[in-house]
Amino acid sequence: MKALETLIPPPIVTVIIMILMYWVPRSILASSIQSSLLFFAAIATGLAAIMIMLAGIAAFAKDRTTLNPMRIDQASTLVTSGIFKFTRNPMYLGDVIFLFAWCLLLATPWAIFGPFLLMIYLTQFQIKPEERMMQQKFGTAYKAYQSQVRRWI
């Protein structure tokens, strides 16, 4: 399992799950729910997800630290301002919310498993390794931050 840690970039995992969310329900002839309300809810949710991700990117850019989730060791600053006051993982949270928007757009009940699958994957193979590295790199400052801000929301 440890060999899978930080192996696949999170955006790639998100796209793979999006494809599965699209394909699996159709392959088992699941029913779909047609509603213009779902469509507009999907658009609003997707836009919120993008805003959350952009807020995280902006905070990283402001503090001039790496955005690369595959190179955790290159983090030069512990970012705790902006959206990082509310979630330790805004880009990953944005990915999960974006998948929820995709679920609404697909309007198939089985698709709801996609966001949860991504959340489990990211927690195990991306976030926990990042937390170990951040603990090593930033010590008690990171521990204090962990005690103040939740992993997701």
Image: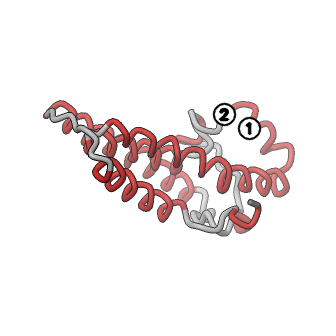
Q: Residue at x 71, y 31 (%)?
A: 148
Q: Residue at x 68, y 50 (%)?
A: 124
Q: Residues within 10 Å of mark 2 (few under 14, many from 20)?
A: some
Q: Residues within 10 Å of mark 1 (few under 14, many from 20)?
A: some
Residue underneath mark 1: 146
Quadrant in the rendering for residue 6: bottom right
- Kind of residue sitting beneath label 1: Gln
Q: Is residue 52 left or right of residue 64?
A: left
Q: Which image quarter is the N terminus in? A: bottom right
Which dot marks residue 101? none
- Kind of residue sitting beneath label 2: Val
In the rendered view, tell whether residue 20 sits above or below residue 119.
Answer: below
In the rendered view, tell whether residue 27 sits above or below residue 43.
Answer: below
Q: Count the labels in the image.
A: 2
Label 2: which secondary element: loop
In the rendered view, tell whether residue 48 sits above or below residue 60.
Answer: above
Residue 151: horizontal and vertical position, in percent?
A: 64, 38
Q: Which image quarter is the C terminus in? A: top right
Q: Marks 1 and 2: CB-CB under 8 Å?
A: yes
Quadrant in the rendering for residue 100: top left
Q: Residue at x 79, y 53 (%)?
A: 132
Residue 70: horizontal and vertical position, in percent?
A: 64, 68
Label 1: which secondary element: helix
Residue 135: horizontal and vertical position, in percent?
A: 82, 50
Residue underneath mark 2: 149
Question: Outermost residue toward the left?
Answer: 36
Residue 3: horizontal and vertical position, in percent?
A: 74, 67
